[in-house]
Image: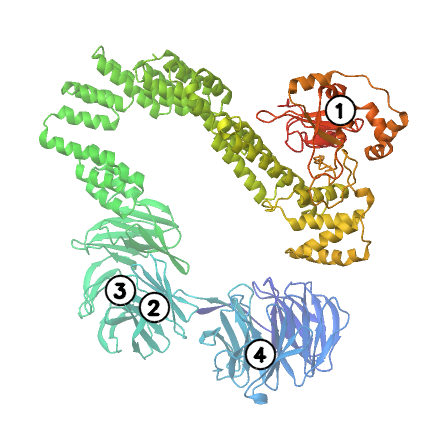
Amino acid sequence: MRAVLTWRDKAEHCINDIAFKPDGTQLILAAGSRLLVYDTSDGTLLQPLKGHKDTVYCVAYAKDGKRFASGSADKSVIIWTSKLEGILKYTHNDAIQCVSYNPITHQLASCSSSDFGLWSPEQKSVSKHKSSSKIICCSWTNDGQYLALGMFNGIISIRNKNGEEKVKIERPGGSLSPIWSICWNPSREERNDILAVADWGQKVSFYQLSGKQIGKDRALNFDPCCISYFTKGEYILLGGSDKQVSLFTKDGVRLGTVGEQNSWVWTCQAKPDSNYVVVGCQDGTISFYQLIFSTVHGLYKDRYAYRDSMTDVIVQHLITEQKVRIKCKELVKKIAIYRNRLAIQLPEKILIYELYSEDLSDMHYRVKEKIIKKFECNLLVVCANHIILCQEKRLQCLSFSGVKEREWQMESLIRYIKVIGGPPGREGLLVGLKNGQILKIFVDNLFAIVLLKQATAVRCLDMSASRKKLAVVDENDTCLVYDIDTKELLFQEPNANSVAWNTQCEDMLCFSGGGYLNIKASTFPVHRQKLQGFVVGYNGSKIFCLHVFSISAVEVPQSAPMYQYLDRKLFKEAYQIACLGVTDTDWRELAMEALEGLDFETAKKAFIRVQDLRYLELISSIERKKRGETNNDLFLADVFSYQGKFHEAAKLYKRSGHENLALEMYTDLCMFEYAKDFLGSGDPKETKMLITKQADWARNIKEPKAAVEMYISAGEHVKAIEICGDHGWVDMLIDIARKLDKAEREPLLLCATYLKKLDSPGYAAETYLKMGDLKSLVQLHVETQRWDEAFALGEKHPEFKDDIYMPYAQWLAENDRFEEAQKAFHKAGRQREAVQVLEQLTNNAVAESRFNDAAYYYWMLSMQCLDIAQDPAQKDTMLGKFYHFQRLAELYHGYHAIHRHTEDPFSVHRPETLFNISRFLLHSLPKDTPSGISKVKILFTLAKQSKALGAYRLARHAYDKLRGLYIPARFQKSIELGTLTIRAKPFHDSEELVPLCYRCSTNNPLLNNLGNVCINCRQPFIFSASSYDVLHLVEFYLEEGITDEEAISLIDLEVLRPKRDDRQLEIANNSSQILRLVETKDSIGDEDPFTAKLSFEQGGSEFVPVVVSRLVLRSMSRRDVLIKRWPPPLRWQYFRSLLPDASITMCPSCFQMFHSEDYELLVLQHGCCPYCRRCKDDPGP
């Protein structure tokens, strides 16, 4: 580091403080009672500023450059604009000692002997805070959050933006060590804010924002008057009573002197973002310096060592980019590196380091020796066991213990020195002198060997790897290359500032100069490319270049010198150059040139490098043929064919008697027209083979249509079909299939397979028909789910019935069409599978609480059993199952409403319906309750609806029954509450709810021990399948001898009857029950012969059915009779409506009875019968 004085001036008074404008163009000085404004470029005094009445002690510029402030002994602070105009003035009670602007908020801190103030442009007044001691200096942190105050009593107070004290640092010296200058480190790379403190205890210290000291105090041996940071916090400037400004590291290590003065230095500042420093002194001198930092470094092969932060050494591996830092904590003056040795010269000693291991990639160094002695030298070189010091004309060789072993005195100044290798302790040195002499010195020999002498001074030297050639750069920027043995000048090149031989190639060197990199191979012309910096090493394809302070490895392809060798057919030399680093294209060019030059060894190596197996096989083939074949025509034909000279190759093949090789060449190259011309009218087999190969080629180059045509013409139908099928060409497949003979089953079958895959089942069916393969046709219809065609084929060929209906049924089941699947199984004669499907559906419906579905499936099961019962062998068993499943269907159909009512929050059924269903289920349930049906839910619903409708006695009975059952937790509370509240109700049921027997007009109790039959006449009640009201129907039976057909014909004979009374009809339209109560038995008997058949013995325990004769049948009206037309083996059932005007509808499929209005509404809602799900448009059974 050295300081160059840029300009100097002298004021009349002491320079108390200095502040730079943030852009660095102006300098504000506090001198006497005035402010002096200088131009920093040339030291011109721009303007003196008058505003203070006494000595100006301090000045500070705002970070934004808009204003600056000055403080004076006249107790005032003046705010100035950047145009040098005063705009504001305020005062303190004592002299102003220091001012500082907040770098973020531009808040101004002004400090006096007794207090400090905080002012910002947006506030009118200055907030002042008392101080316990005189404030000498102040500084803001980088983020503007805290202000540090240095006191005369040795205390540092850290305040926040409001002036409140947050940290107090008490120094050991107390009032004997006044804090004269402080400054926060401006670096943003530091993790913590670091405060540098200089006191008149002649110490410099460092603190964190928390008040914790960093390291120890560093002694100065002078009284510091100013401290400031330089170049973004890397260094510290310190000046004071020692009459000089010194440069320190940021850790307090002294590096050197910036400038010596004639009086005390009161202030020093660094110009923003530059390497300039201004110094102000007691005698009024202002000095402006430029600091120049020289590069201290050393290089050996791929290891580069350089100085960093003046006190550290970084060793960089240029290939792996690894770096290691060695902290010396003192100024590093010289660096030398050689093999595993590293020498570092410090002011008072030299440190010798060595690597931990012999590993080439190892980057860990340890101290080997220390030479505690001060040396003055221009150059430093390290060897295995020695260090070499160069001082002008003298070279000294010292051991690592510091003992001088040898000394060489030169005739002229030493300009360049380099270690060129050798055994440990006997290394050779290459030395260049100013007088042009070039010497070789061995460290164990006192005598220097003169290699050669030239007329111009030496600037740079290097020796080739074989020690046979020497490259010199002289003071005229000329690169000269000599033969060391003959001293002959081989060549010279201009515009060079440094030179380096390639360590891996004897005849290659590079030199730099004028912003270009020049590469020279042998005596060929120079290859030039742009490159900034100095060449310091050349290893293989990597050139090490030093630019400013950093070194980098530049990868340079060696293409240009390689082509220079190729032009002269020097293939082996070109191969050596290529091994240093060229592109794949260059390798291929080298291989082709060597092959054309018949240098097969070099060509083989180059083709191996680019992994070109094709040409390697050619070379191998040529080498074999050369051993066993003497025909040069065949050899030349192979070369011509690989070079693309195909016609010449074919002629040579024919001349050598190898026409087959020519034909193979043409077909391999897909040059079929040339092959046909070459073949002429030859063997038909070869022609067919040629067409097939041409088709294969067309297929490979993605010309499938041409390939298909060629395959067909060659008779290769299977390959043609495969291409058409893979590309989905249905039309071409159809044409091929239609043209093929039916005896060619394999291609026809392949055609059909592809047509099936391509979703063209119609054409596939046509192909199967052509083959006569009906089984495959059936399978096609089944796989494509073309069931209509499959059924039609099954009708013609019953032997395929199982092959059709079984897959159809399975397909229906897989698509959740279980009802249709069951029918299909039934149709296929698979009764067991049909029943299994229904049973599984039923069990699933019950398990999933889909009781309406369960009812439907049970009804279907019953009808299935009835169908099977036509077989006399299974009649009794199946009829039993029929009645059982019919009963379960009725139970689950009714229970569905109960379940919905108890589980869903909203009920779709009227209370009367739920009441009727509950009673129906209680009377109908067998001893073993069917799966899924909860008696608790039935009783709970009955109790709840009975209570709501006024059937209190029945509700009380239901609640009593519930007490004996296990109650789910969710019903527990409701049932307990209902049990309590029902006790407050009367002990009877509403008469409106009592059911009436339409045969004997007897009122039946709500809870009937006999079940769903009349307690008087034992006539079974007939319920509506929707509202579960008792319908006004009476079942009657035919006398013996009357067939169903005769009964129908008799009923259809309508007999005229006397017209009924209008009043009776009107009442009948209102309520059927009221009509029965007002009519007399005699009047009915007079009108209707059927009523006479309703008589029975009162109180009989046996049920007496109503049996009618032909006379009675003839008297009936067709609209009053409902008939359940069961299929055999069951008999039909006949029912007579006793209230004809109250319409009743019976489903023709399931024979369930409904009030007509209810049925029509349900069919409109669901589109089908709610019981058997027969659609309204479906015909009856």
Give whichever of 231, 602 is nearer the camera. Answer: 602
Is the C-beta separation of discs 4 and 3 under 8 Å? no
At label 3, the amino acid type is Arg
Circle 1: element type:
helix
Which is more N-terminal, label 1 or label 4?
A: 4
Do callouts 3 and 1 mark residues in contact (Cβ within 8 Å)? no
Q: Is residue 875 above or below residue 172?
A: above
Quadrant location, the C terminus: top right
Secondary structure under tag 2 reads strand
Whether pointer 4 and pointer 1 mark residues with C-beta atoms closer than 8 Å, the reply is no
Give the number of the mark in front: 3 or 1.
Answer: 1
Q: Residues within 10 Å of mark 1 (few under 14, many from 20)?
A: some
The residue beneath circle 2 is 335
Say whether residue 1098 is left or right of residue 181: right
Q: Which residue is mark 4?
A: 181
Give the amino acid type for the residue marked by disc 4 in the picture: Ser
Task: Return the x and y of residue 447 as percentages of the image width and height.
Answer: 17, 68
Q: How much space separates mark 4 and mark 2, taking CA atoms? A: 36 Å
Q: How many neighbours does mark 2 have within 10 angstroms: few (below 14), some (14-19), or many (20 or more)?
A: many
In this view of the protein, can residue 759 be seen by the observer? yes
Q: Amino acid at mark 1?
A: Asp
